[in-house]
Image: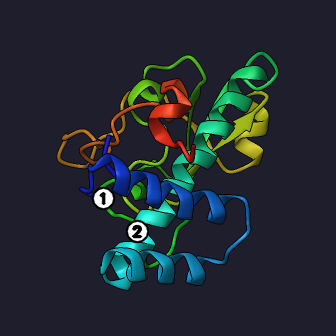
Amino acid sequence: FSVGGITEETVLRQIWGVLDDAIRGEVTLGEAVKALRNQFGIDAAHAQTIIRTNVQSAYQWGHAQQLQAVRDTYPIWGFDVVLDDNTTEDICMPLAGLAYPADHGIWDSFYPPNHYNCRTTVYPLADATEASDAGFGLASGWPVFANGSPVLAADGFQLNIGTVPLSKIYDAT
């Protein structure tokens, strides 16, 4: 396992300690960035990417567990994409407004986070009417670009974070 290319076990434990403080709300993003910068000599952008991506991964792991628990009530899931100047045009933007059955294969390899600094999440929907009312379109096939090439999550993110044991994602012990 690695965090932003860093793999040494003791270093990972130190990073997880900072992440644990951030996830618990014991420190602000700015304080966590400063801690990583001071401990490891990395720049602010790298520190923010490490924190945001790993906090989002932990959040999405828990969200995936919750969605599985209510899958019978909410059998459709939609990609809830933050659309702004920072949205990735080649990964998340094409997913905006798409909804798939909860048992569709897309969720096996395209559950957020889909890349570093990803802000997309999954929105549970009870039925096609609710999906439509919420601005989602039901999809069945894999999302593709106009040229026919498939939309794919970034390397290292092609999985469903909810199916990964939590200890492989985050461990502050």
* Vertical position of residue 169 compared to residue 96: above or below: above
The answer to whether marks 2 and 1 mark residues whose Cβ atoms lie closer than 8 Å is: yes
Q: Could you say where residue 22 lies in the image, as x and y percent from the top left?
A: 63, 65
Give the labeled residue for mark 2: 49
Q: Residue at x 39, y 52 (%)?
A: 12
Q: Could you say where residue 100 lies in the image, as x and y percent from the top left?
A: 55, 29
Q: Could you say where residue 98 lies in the image, as x and y percent from the top left?
A: 53, 42
Q: Amino acid at mark 2?
A: Thr
Label 2 environment density (alpha carbons within 10 Å; few <14, some 14–19, many ≥20): some
Q: CA distance from mark 2 to mark 1?
A: 8 Å
Q: How many marks?
A: 2
**Callout 2 secondary element:** helix
Q: Amino acid at mark 1?
A: Gly
Residue 40 picture quarter: bottom left
Q: Residue at x 51, y 33 (%)?
A: 167
Q: Residue at x 74, y 34 (%)?
A: 125
Q: Is residue 20 left or right of residue 132?
A: left
Point out the image quarter for the N terminus.
top left
Give the labeled residue for mark 1: 4
Using the image as rendered, state which of residue 40 and residue 61 is in the foreground: 40
